[in-house]
Structure formats: C-alpha cells, structure tokens
C-alpha cells in the first residue's frame, strides 16, 4: 500500500513540475512577443516621424517628416514658395525681400544676422528641427543644432527644378506643383502684356548707379531675371557683349559714368538701393534721360532673385513699363 502511495506522490510531483515549466515557457514567450511588438512600434514611430532626403550636394540626411521649426540662411523665398514659413532667416533676405512678406502668413521671422556669420546662440534658442543652408561650409556648425541640408540653386536648371527639389526636401510636393503652375501662368501673362506694347527690336538697359561707377545688371541676376528672362526684353548688343566678355566676373560688368552712353538702350531701368551719387553731364545729356525713358525700381523689391520675388518683379516691371510707354 505504501508503495502505491509513494508512486502516486511522485507522479503528482512530476505533473506539477511539468505544469510549472509550461507556465514559465508561456510567460517567457509572451514577454518576448511583447518586447518584439515594442521594438516594432519603435521602428514604426521612427519611420512615421522622419525620412531620408538627398540634398543639393548629394548628402543623404535624416530629417523630420513634417518639419515645424525651420531655419533657412539664404533661400527664404524658395521655402515660402512651398508653404513653409521658417522661424528664422538672415538680414539681407528679410530686409530686401519685400515681395516675400505677404507669404509670412502673419508670422514673425527672426533675424539671425549676416548669412556668413549667423548668431548660433539665437539659432540654438529657437530649437529648430531642420536647418537649410546655402553652403557646405556651414554644415558642421549647424549640425550641432539640428539636422542640416544644403540647398543651392546653382545645382538646378531653372525655377521648376529648384522648387521641385525644395518641395521634396520639405515633403511639400503638392505645394511645389501648385506654385510652379501659378508661376508659369503669371509669367506668360506678364510677357504677353509687354509684347502688346513693346515693338520688336526695342532695347532695355538695367543699371545700379553709385558714386564712382555704374553696375550693368545682366540676365540671371537680381532684376535681370525679371526683365530679360521672364519678360523677354532685349538688352543692347553692347551689354550682351560686355556680359559675355566678363565670364561671370561681376567686377567686369561695371562701367564708368563717362562711357554709360555706349550701354544705354531705348529705355533704361534703375535699381535704386538708396546709394548716394550725383549724375554727370554725360548722363544728363542722354536722350533716354531727356525724353523721360528712365524707370526707377525700388531696390528693396528687386534685390532678391527667388521665384516669388522674380515673378512679382516681372509683373511690377511690366506695369511700370506699360504706363511709361502710354505716356510717351
């Protein structure tokens, strides 16, 4: 009898042990699944909040999916064009970007100082989640503050490519498409308005006047984009040759007051940046001056060469040129 009791006790102990081991195994499995699920959630969260973009110089950078506090040290207009209002930018683009202000959406943009010497302390205090710079040299100092991408218009062929690129970097692709369509239509309308009043062969010069010399503004520069590229106005042959011979050296695109007559077209546009100068007798005796064929444009509206500024400059130029022609 005792023999059977002992055997039963051992069987019961063995079964209890097996049940305990099974329960432990099940618990471990559940814990493992929970941990795995947690890891999956973390990976999913990372994927949903950040993305990898390729910037203008080919760097792959992990950036926020929807950046909310952006700093841009130069190309403010491009960022605004795709519907993003940055928290900060630099002195020149803020101070000489009058056409951009209607795109601020009622927000204040902090001035960080000169684009080549921004206040890193101020930038840090703004807690940006993305910094956009125009130059690779700035990457090292900016990356200590926030993820940094390089956006350089030199790497793109025209406005459509520029806006498409910045739209992709900021994940605002649809805003980029809308801007490009609007820009293209407005440029076409402005060009057609000019063609209706300016006969073929009429030439236009664009200058900035200063005390010692006159800067010739070519196609592709601030103001020149609007006049020559969008409105399709024609520069005098002498200016075209000057620009070709300069090979992009802006110092060689400057002329003295004494020879300005050689570079004057049928009309002259002046970009006025409040520089002090006195006109010379050579200037005062030019036919375009005597016949009131000189138009002055406020430099604060014509310094920037971003797409927002340029399309507004073209429309503004067209209106002023048409008004002047009708007065003749």
Image: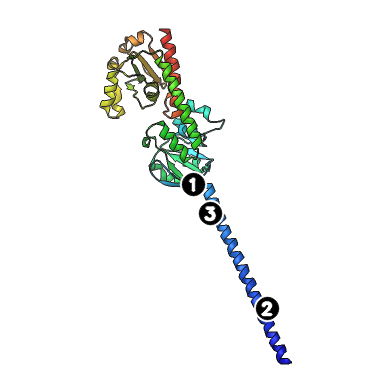
* Residue for point 65% across, 75% down: 20
Secondary structure under badge 3? helix
According to the image, label 2 marks what residue? 16
According to the image, label 3 marks what residue? 43
| Whole-percent x, y for residue 149 in the image | 44, 42
Q: Earlier in the sequence, mark 3 or mark 1?
A: 3
Q: Residues within 10 Å of mark 1 (few under 14, many from 20)?
A: some
Say which quadrant the C terminus sits in: top left
Q: Earlier in the sequence, mark 1 or mark 2?
A: 2
Residue 283 vertical placement versus 69 (above, below): above
Examine the image and state in which quarter residue 300 appears: top left
Residue 77 vertical placement versus 124 (above, below): above
* Residues at discs 1 and 2 in contact (Cβ within 8 Å): no
Label 1 vs label 2: CA separation? 53 Å
| Whole-percent x, y for residue 285 in the image | 32, 9
Secondary structure under badge 1? strand
| Whole-percent x, y for residue 199 in the image | 36, 13
């Amino acid at each position: 009898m005792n023999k059977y009791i002992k055997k039963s006790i051992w069987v019961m102990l063995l079964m209890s042990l097996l049940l305990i081991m099974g329960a432990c195994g099940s618990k471990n499995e559940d814990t493992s699944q929970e941990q795995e699920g947690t890891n999956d959630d973390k990976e999913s969260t990372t994927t949903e909040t950040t993305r990898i973009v390729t910037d203008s110089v080919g760097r792959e950078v992990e950036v926020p999916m929807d950046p909310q506090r952006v700093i841009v040290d130069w190309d403010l207009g491009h960022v605004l064009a795709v519907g993003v209002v940055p928290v900060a930018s630099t002195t020149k683009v803020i101070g000489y970007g009058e056409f951009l202000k209607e795109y601020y959406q009622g927000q204040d943009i902090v001035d960080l100082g000169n684009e080549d010497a921004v206040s890193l302390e101020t930038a840090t205090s703004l807690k940006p989640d993305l910094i956009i710079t125009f130059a690779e040299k700035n990457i090292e100092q900016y990356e200590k503050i926030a993820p940094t991408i390089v956006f350089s218009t030199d790497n793109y062929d025209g406005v459509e490519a520029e806006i498409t690129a910045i739209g992709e970097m900021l994940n605002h692709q649809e805003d980029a498409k809308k801007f490009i369509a609007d820009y293209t239509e407005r440029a076409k309308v402005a060009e057609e308005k000019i063609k209706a009043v300016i006969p073929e062969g009429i030439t236009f010069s664009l200058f900035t006047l200063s005390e010692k010399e006159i800067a010739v503004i070519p196609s592709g520069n601030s103001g020149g984009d609007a006049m020559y590229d969008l409105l399709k106005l024609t520069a005098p042959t002498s200016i075209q040759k000057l620009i070709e011979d300069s090979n992009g050296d802006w110092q060689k695109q400057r002329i003295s007051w004494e020879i300005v007559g050689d570079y004057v077209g049928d009309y002259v546009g002046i970009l006025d940046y409040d520089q002090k100068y006195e006109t010379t007798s050579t200037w005062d005796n030019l036919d375009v001056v005597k016949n009131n064929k000189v138009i002055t444009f406020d430099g604060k509206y014509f310094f920037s060469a971003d797409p927002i500024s340029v399309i507004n400059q073209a429309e503004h130029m067209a209106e002023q040129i048409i008004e002047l022609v009708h007065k003749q």
